[in-house]
Every structure is written in C-alpha cells, then in structure tokens.
Image (cartoon, rainbow, N blue to C red):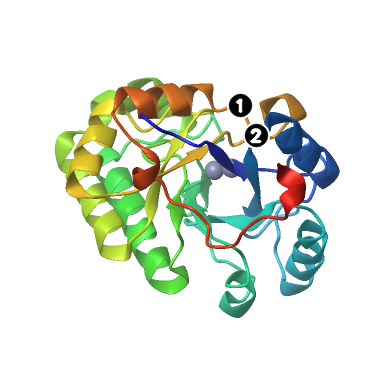
Amino acid sequence: MELTPADLHTHSTFSDGTTTLEQIAAIAGSAGMAVGVADHCGPGSFQLDSDERFRRYFEAVSRHPVYRSVELDLGREINVSRENLKRCDYLIGGVHSLGGRDFFDGAQAWTDIPGLLDGILAAIDEKARIFDFDILAHPGLLPASLRSRQSALLDSRWDQRLIGLALEHGFALEISSRWQVPSAGTIRRAAAAGVTFALGSDAHRPEQVCRLDHSLSLAAACGLTDADLFRPARQLAEKIA
Ligand SMILES: [Zn+2]
Ligand SMILES: [Zn+2]
C-alpha cells in the first residue's frame, strides 16, 4: 500500500480562510507534504469575483511553493474568464448553491429532494463542459438542513450517475477530510469503474492545513494507491522538501 498524500484543497485569506499564503506554505513544508491553494471563485464579496481579483490572487500564490488552484461554485455564474482560470495548475469545482440558494445556510428548507439531486448533477455536468475542472470537491455534500440524512438520500443510482459524469469529463472525486464524503461504498464503486481521486482538507484555518487523517484512512481502507490519485503536472519548487 503506497499513498503519498498531497492536500490539494485549502483556503487562504484571499477568500474566506484565516490562513495566509505564507502560513500555508510553511505548514506544508513542515509536514513534508505538497499543498494546493484553492480559494473560492464565484460572485460575492469573499470570493474571487473578477479577472482583476483573480490576477492579484494568482500572482500572490505564484510566489509560494504551492499549487495554484481555485474552487469554482458550480451552482453560480463564474465571473473570471476561462483563459485566466486555465493558468491554474488544476481546477476544483464544488456545488455550494443551486438557484441562488446557499447550501451552507441552515435556514434554507429543501422540499423537492429529487429536483435537488438532479440539479446537483446537472450543475456538475454543465460546468464541467465549460471549465473542464479536474477535481470535484466534497462529492455528495448536501445542503445543511439535509446533511444528517445525506447518506440515505444518495442512493446507488445517484452514485452511478455521478461516476458516469466523472468518467465522461475525466474529473477526480475528492475524498474530503472536512466533510467526510464520499462514502466508502461510493469510493469503491468509483475506483472499480476507473475514476481517480484527490485528497483535500478544505482547510479554512491554520490547524486544518494538511490534516488529511480521514481522507488517508478511508483511501487506505478502500485499497487506493498512488496510481488512483490525481496529481498536478507541475513540479513544485524544491523548498517543499
Ligand atoms: Zn467547497
Ligand atoms: Zn473549499
């Protein structure tokens, strides 16, 4: 069993994280782990919501021995050009909202569950066609008010449709330490179908950076090896080692 961990999903002070780029690079260096910064990209004050903001972000991240990425909100319009986004080492997409309704707002009630589950897959499919993102963040993470029931709501038919999209578009499924999705069953089915995976802390605070305990133990339990993991093509500066 061989797994070389890389934390490909962290947030900095350029979006809603409290960790500076300097801190992220230093923590990853101490951990001896490759790290990627993927700040939120979409409309809204805490996000990278224009080409100008993206440019400042990209230049800043480029000064550190870290991968350069963003996390696109697949449920919203993206206000940064595709050409700019393609300068990243890889792109992450995650469904954080649908129809203007925020998945992280616990007060939002979702009554049309089949419509929601179809909508999530449709948003992934639509944005994958446009942006060709590399990693799907926290697959199967449902709105806050449904989260306690999400493993029951996501049946094997939904899983198969998600796996079909991953194969069709070639994106990896993230095994998220923060949100503890997807399930071991989903990972095993996806791996058997030939899907690749990525590990992510989804860190928003310094103590969360490179904390991949859940992702690593689940990946090992499902028999994944380095051959199953997505890797950015660029070599990071030797400062990491
Ligand atoms: Zn996310
Ligand atoms: Zn995130």
| Vertical comparison of 169 with 192: above or below | below
Q: Is mark 2 within 8 Å of ligand 2?
A: no
Q: Residue at x 16, y 36 (%)?
A: 156
The N terminus lies in quadrant: top left
Q: Nearer the viewer, residue 233 or 11?
A: 233
Relative to 215, does residue 136 appear above or below in the rendering? below
- Distance, label 2 to label 1, CA atoms, is 8 Å
Give neighbour class at mark 1: few <14, some 14-19, many 20+ (Cα, 10 Å).
some
Query: At 74% across and 39% down in the image, what residue appears?
Result: 17
Indicate the position of residue 43 as horizontal and vertical percent values: 65, 60
Residue 209 in percent (x, y) is at 68, 32
Between 56 and 77, the one nearer to me in the picture:
56
Residue at the image point whose x is 23% and y is 50% from the top: 194
Q: Nearer the viewer, residue 206 or 139?
A: 206
Q: Is the residue under label 1 in contact with that under label 2 (CB below 8 Å)?
A: yes
Q: Which residue is mark 2?
A: 203
**Percent position (x, y) of residue 187?**
28, 35
> Which element is circle 2 on?
loop
Return the x and y of residue 128 as percentages of the image width and height. 39, 65
Residue 147, compared with residue 62, is above or below; it is above
Q: Give whichever of discs 2 and 1 has the lower sequence position.
A: 2
What residue is shown with label 1? 211
Quarter of the image for the C terminus: give it: top right
Amino acid type for the residue under numbered disc 2: Ala
Is the residue 66 above or below the residue 29 in the image? below
Residue nearer the viewer, 230 or 114: 230
Q: Is residue 138 visible?
A: yes
Task: Spot the residue most to the left.
Answer: 157
Query: Considering the numbered disc 1 on the image, is that residue within a helix, a strand or a loop?
Result: loop
Left or right, 9 with reference to 219: right
